[in-house]
Image: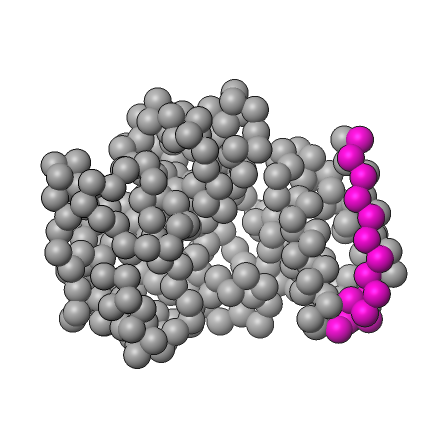
Amino acid sequence: YHRIAQDAQDPWQLCVSPANFAAQMQLVRRQRRPMRLDELTQQLAQGRRPRGAVVVTFDDGYRDNLLAALPVLEANDVPATVFCTAGYVGSEQPFWWDRLAALLLAPTRLPPTLALDVSGRQWQVALGPAATGDSAARLAFYREVWGWLRPMTDADRTLALEAIAAWSTDAALAPTPATLSAQQLRELAASPLIDIGAHSVTHAALPALAPQQQRDEIAQSKAQLEAMLGRAVQHFAYPFGDQSAETAVLIREAGFLSSCTTEHGAVRAGADLFQLPRVAVGDWDGETFSRTLQGVA
């Protein structure tokens, strides 16, 4: 999971409505064995795969994880791990992809051509129908620019976003989903059902970075979250699911016990604890969710 919300602007389909999430958690409680990630990794390390187990995870650290997801989890006694992007906790800045969506998807019209020059690299695209608000063309344009920004360093991406904001001068920014404040993170972590994991500092595409930059993103995310919470943060999730053998080694060296990918599938006995697959959940009703669980069991 990422967000428990209903949002008209959801280009990556990250939102699950509160009603569907409630139905899904009821099914997890009735049909499966909800389990903490800690317990699952301990059993896997001992060569066991607990039958019927389901581990619920959230990526990024959106505020609705506290406000909308936690009450449902508590009502159904379902534990969860929330992987937080440490640098965005307590920040007034939205996640960069949400800011990009507000800049590119909300305006009714955009200039006909976008050109970017960031750290000596140049990109240019003619918008065509996307300039006048054709929804399919605008979404394709957004995803193309997102692809440019994804492998950048955080500093370069910030420069690029500022350039896009200046280019889109008549854009009336749509509201962007809020991230957790430090106090809200502590409130979330205070629930006996919630564990906090790390998701890098800036939501970096880790393999695209130099080794020392990867090391800093990984180790600092752990250190920053532990400083906020006053307790150990032991599990990691790869931003975007991007990974490499080198990245996995750095995660081990930082002291994490496991890391989760975005590769679709069930966890099997003997699974690599630093390559754990998951199932991305859509805004599905209970019947669709139940069929999906059966398909990966």
Would residue 90 be visible to someone looking at this image?
no
Q: Is residue 130 above or below residue 89?
A: below
Quadrant where the C terminus sits is bottom left
- In this rendering, would 269 be left or right of 292? left
- In this rendering, would 149 be left or right of 291? right
- In this rendering, would 95 be left or right of 41? right
Q: Which residues are magenta?
A: 120-134
Q: Is residue 125 magenta?
A: yes
Of residues 196 and 296, the one nearer the viewer is 296
Q: Residue at (59%, 59%) from the top-left corner? A: 176
Picture coordinates of residue 250, whole percent (x, y): 40, 25
> How many callouts does the rendering have?
0
Q: Is residue 156 above or below residue 80?
A: above
- In this rendering, would 278 be left or right of 48? right
Q: Quadrant of residue 160?
A: top right
Q: Residue at (52%, 22%) from the top-left corner? A: 211
Picture coordinates of residue 186, whole percent (x, y): 34, 45
Would residue 69 be visible to someone looking at this image?
yes
Q: Quadrant of residue 159?
A: top right
Which residue ends up furthest to the right in the rendered image? 112
Q: Residue at (43%, 57%) from the top-left corner? A: 2
Q: Quadrant of residue 106?
A: bottom right
Of residues 292 and 65, the one nearer the viewer is 292
How is colour applied across the structure in the image?
one colour
Of residues 148 and 255, the one nearer the viewer is 148
Picture coordinates of residue 188, whole percent (x, y): 32, 51
Quadrant where the N terminus sits is bottom left
Q: Residue at (75%, 73%) from the top-left corner? A: 134
Picture coordinates of residue 107, whole percent (x, y): 75, 66
Q: Is residue 44 magenta?
A: no
